[in-house]
Image (cartoon, helix red, strand yellow):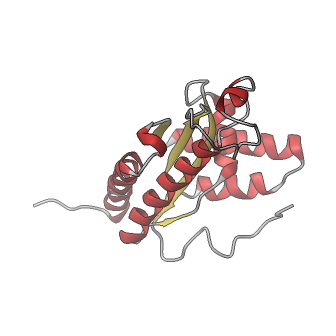
Amino acid sequence: MAVYREETITQEALLRVASLMVTAARTAPKTRGRDQLEFLIVDGDDLEKIAVKMEELGELTKAYFFGRDANDLRRSAAAVLFGTRIRALDLPYCGWCGFKDCAEKNRHPENPCAFNNIDLGIAIGSAVSVAMEHRVDNRIMYTIGQAVRDLGYFPPDIRIILGVPLSATSKNIYFNRTGKSR
């Protein structure tokens, strides 16, 4: 007979849910079937490393919500990271990125194709629905993505990144958050 402590059970469950979230994101529909997305799961010391960077960015930019989000990340058991490359999809008629067509957009490689962001959003929506189905608290955070990008967790061609921290406690830590938001 073995005894399993709640902390161990919860951590293992959250990592399983994080894996299922990645699977849901991977299988989400992509524009023209072209996959520009990559995903990572972080926990343990990496959460603190990212939180420290988030605080640095908050101080640098005076956007103090980075610090609030860093505190939430520290209280999380894991986070799923979602990133996309910036690549035009060579559509014959679009202009959603603000340029005339994909050929013109390609002359501006730092400007995202609108569909890169749309595909990322669909994938994250699919992933957080998995978290919801398993009663795992989560919140989509741009602040995590900015820190992760600066820390180089993804290859340099992954330019747009969002993070989703995960928690399973008696109260949702991402609801009624305190701290400055401006």
Residue 165 occupies which quadrant of the picture?
Answer: bottom right
User: Where does the image place residue 159, in percent across and percent down from the top left?
Assistant: 64, 33
Establish if 131 lies above or below 155: below
Number of numbered discs overlaid on the protein picture: 0
User: Where does the image place residue 69, in percent across and percent down from the top left?
Assistant: 69, 56
**Which quadrant: the C terminus?**
bottom right
Give the camera-side residue of 29 and 131: 29
Give the camera-side residue of 107 and 149: 107
**Which quadrant: the N terminus?**
bottom left
Can residue 41 be seen in the rendering of this structure? no
Q: Residue at x 68, y 39 (%)?
A: 147
User: Where does the image place residue 54, in percent across and percent down from the top left?
Assistant: 72, 44
Q: Residue at x 43, y 65 (%)?
A: 129
Question: Left of 87 or right of it: where is 21?
Answer: left
Question: Left of 152 or right of it: where is 63?
Answer: right
User: Where does the image place residue 141, in percent across and percent down from the top left?
Assistant: 64, 55
Can residue 141 be seen in the rendering of this structure? yes
Establish if 116 lies above or below 171: above
Q: Residue at x 63, y 73 (%)?
A: 175
Q: Going by the picture, which residue comes out furthest to the front?
A: 92
Q: Going by the picture, which residue comes out furthest to the right?
A: 62
Residue 107 occupies which quadrant of the picture?
Answer: top right
